């Protein structure tokens, strides 16, 4: 697949319309790029993403990874709101400090009914992986 089904702007508009709850309390997730089978998303540093001890919480990293993979799928197949997560697996590799994170999502397989991808989460100033995630998504049949 050499092209995307939706541009960055179209993907952003769809995500904002379909999932306004992701920005409840202020926008901290930013889709910064989409490409064939790929998406890059940034999560700003915010106190609501921290756990005791001052590190980014697991749930914040999980949300970022899931949202980035979903954006990669949407950019690749178009506006399919009912594509849903069926499995997510996380390997937390390093404890990030109180910082924002960058998610690089890549689809490994994009079929008619399933999409499988992986996400690498890093701190903006480091190439060291903080978390590696894999996910599977169910794509509804066309009606």
Image (tube, grey):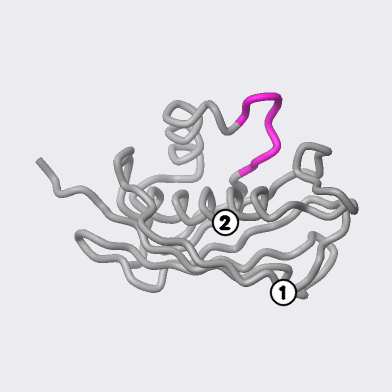
Question: Label 1 crowding class (10 Å Cα cut-off): few <14, some 14-19, many 20+?
Answer: few
Residue lying at 49% horizontally and 67% vertically, measured from the top left: 106
Q: Is residue 39 left or right of residue 28?
A: left
Picture quadrant of residue 18: top left
Q: What is the span of residues highlighted in magenta in the rendered image? A: 23-30
**Going by the picture, which residue comes out furthest to the left?**
143
Q: Residues within 10 Å of mark 2 (few under 14, many from 20)?
A: many
Residue pictured at 65% horizontal, 41% vertical? 29
Res 93 label: 1
Above or below, 124 against 47 in this view is below
Q: Work out whether mark 1 precedes mark 2 in sequence or the reverse, and give the earlier one.
A: 2
Residue 28 among those drawn in magenta: yes
Q: Quadrant of the C terminus?
A: top left
Element on which disc 2 rests: helix
- Please tell me which residue lies in front, 21 or 41: 21
Q: Which mark is residue 32?
A: none
Task: Choose top left, top right, bottom left or bottom right for residue 7.
Answer: top left
Between tags 1 and 2, which lies in front?
1
Q: Please name the residue shown 40% across and 50% down the image.
A: 75
Specify whether residue 20 is painted magenta.
Answer: no
139 to the left or right of 45: left
Q: Nearer the viewer, residue 103 or 78?
A: 103
Identify the residue under disc 2.
Answer: 65
Percent across and percent down for residue 100 are 78, 50
User: In the picture provided, is 111 more to the left or to the right than 20?
Assistant: left
Q: Are marks 1 and 2 in contact (CB under 8 Å)?
A: no
Disc 1 secondary structure class: loop
Q: Position of residue 56 (x, y in %)?
A: 78, 53
Query: Residue 67: image x %, image y %?
Result: 52, 48
């Amino acid at each position: 697949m050499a092209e995307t089904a939706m541009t960055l702007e179209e993907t952003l508009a769809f995500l904002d319309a379909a999932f306004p709850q992701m920005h409840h309390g202020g926008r901290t997730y930013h889709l910064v790029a989409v490409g064939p089978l790929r998406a890059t998303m940034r999560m700003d540093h915010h106190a609501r993403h921290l756990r005791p001890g001052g590190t980014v919480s697991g749930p914040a990293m999980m949300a970022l990874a899931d949202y980035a993979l979903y954006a990669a799928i949407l950019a690749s197949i178009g506006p399919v709101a009912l594509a849903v997560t069926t499995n997510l697996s996380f390997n937390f590799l390093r404890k990030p400090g109180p910082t924002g994170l960058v998610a690089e999502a890549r689809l490994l397989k994009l079929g008619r009914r399933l999409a499988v991808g992986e996400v690498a989460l890093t701190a903006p100033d480091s190439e060291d992986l903080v978390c590696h995630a894999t996910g599977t998504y169910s794509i509804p049949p066309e009606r």
